[in-house]
Image (tube, grey):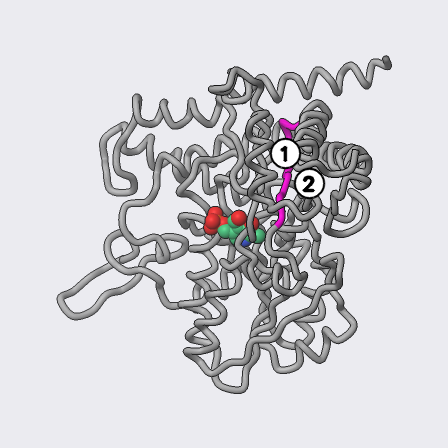
Amino acid sequence: MTTATLAADAKQARIVGDFPILNKPTSRGQRLVYLDSAATSQKPQSVIDSLVKYYSEYNANIHRGVYEIAARATDAFEEARAKVARFVNAAEPAEIIWTRNSTEAINLVSYTWGLENLKPGDAIVTTQLEHHSNLVPWQLLAAKTGAELRFIPVDERGVHVITDVDSLLDGAKLLALSHVSNTLGTIAPLEMLVRRAHKAGARVLVDAAQSVPHMPVDVRALDVDFMAVSGHKMLGPTGIGFLYGKRDLLEAMPPFLTGGDMIRRVEYTTTEFNELPWKFEAGTSNIADAIGLGAAVDYLSEIGMDWVRAHEIRVTSYALQRLEELKRRGLAVYGPPGAENRAGVISFNLGDVHAHDVASILDTESVCVRAGHHCTMPLMERMGWPATARASFYIYNTEADVDALVAALHKAANIFKLPA
Ligand SMILES: Cc1ncc(COP(=O)(O)O)c(C=O)c1O
């Protein structure tokens, strides 16, 4: 073994060691093989500690308190925003708006920018791959404003078909698309699509729920106008996410929710709104979880997002290779070819066995995968699949996890008497 391999193994072992849930036996007395990070990630000890520390040492409401722990809470909350801004290379922390998750971030844009800017005859362009969170808000916006909803198609592998993109973008006010598909792992050709959308005069919203946790994402290099992210998929707590928006766009938008904190001055009949980012943060914020997300960003920054992406390519490539041996038993693997062309997501079906049955058998080996439509019902319909099982990888997954998945799939194939 080379020194470099030993160092890589040590780094991997240290990462796995940082996640308490992965280091205790399951209720079945087995090792937890967690392959569902596209749904939500596990949390390292440092993130858990940051929550306990806030609640046990300086719990107080932010922005208004003059006493020491309130000032400390405010500083930690705003420092977390600054960490997130640096992580995605926003021009300034004020361009980061805390939300509950990416769904809320997308709705914020739809209800504010969307209602102000769209009218009959305009178009909203999205893709056939979208999570319901990046589809239903645009359906409602189209219905309310009279705008038309158009779809960039995908081929049988779930890869964007871009031949007619310019005509789809003709007359578009918005291109709203996921950077990475949660069902197939497809990575959108974002730079090219952003360029073409801007040329057509459209704004671009990127649903980055599945990309920011897994690869370096630079909002200024990509020149996206809005970006939605969920903290719980990137080692952070549930209940916290963020919207990135370019300052000039956010400035021009009306507030989303109204009430305390988002105001500068209130009289009985009128209100002057607060400046960015607080204009969009009505009521008491999710202070603890924002601080927890800051700790998650510290953790990921320390590991390095280039390493995260390279690691996921390694594990995904190994998985694609190992799953080959199940093809003779009826396994169908979906998505773009090769590990470099997708994120660490593999959707599959085993013969005619329903994905829920496959997932239940995998669970008897403490192998956690998701089964169903993955909140992409139109994509399932487009592909003709009733459901798929989905394994998704993150920094703490290893080749041993892939081996456990393959062994559990053989068990499922045996139970359903599929060809040996
Ligand atoms: C691509 C994509 N967009 C949006 C979402 C919604 O995320 P949340 O439920 O955290 O708002 C998900 C969640 O799985 C997702 O995968």
Residue 196 part of the magenta segment: no
Q: Residue at x 50, y 22 (%)?
A: 21
Q: Which residue is labeled 2 in the image? A: 344
Q: Is residue 295 left or right of residue 257?
A: right
Give the Cα separation between the discs numbered 1 and 2. Answer: 7 Å
Q: Which residue is labeled 1 in the image? A: 394
Q: Which residues are magenta?
A: 388-397
Secondary structure found at label 2: loop
Front residue of 38 and 32: 32
Q: Which label's residue is closer to the chain start, 1 or 2?
A: 2
Q: Residue at x 60, y 72 (%)?
A: 125
Q: Mark 1 and 2 residues: CB-CB less than 8 Å, in contact?
A: yes
The percent position of residue 149, horizontal first and vertical second, equals 56, 76
Query: Which quadrant, please, contains the N terminus?
Result: top right
Q: Residue at x 82, y 18 (%)?
A: 4
Ligand 1 within 8 Å of disc 2? The answer is no
Front residue of 397 and 199: 397
Secondary structure found at label 1: loop
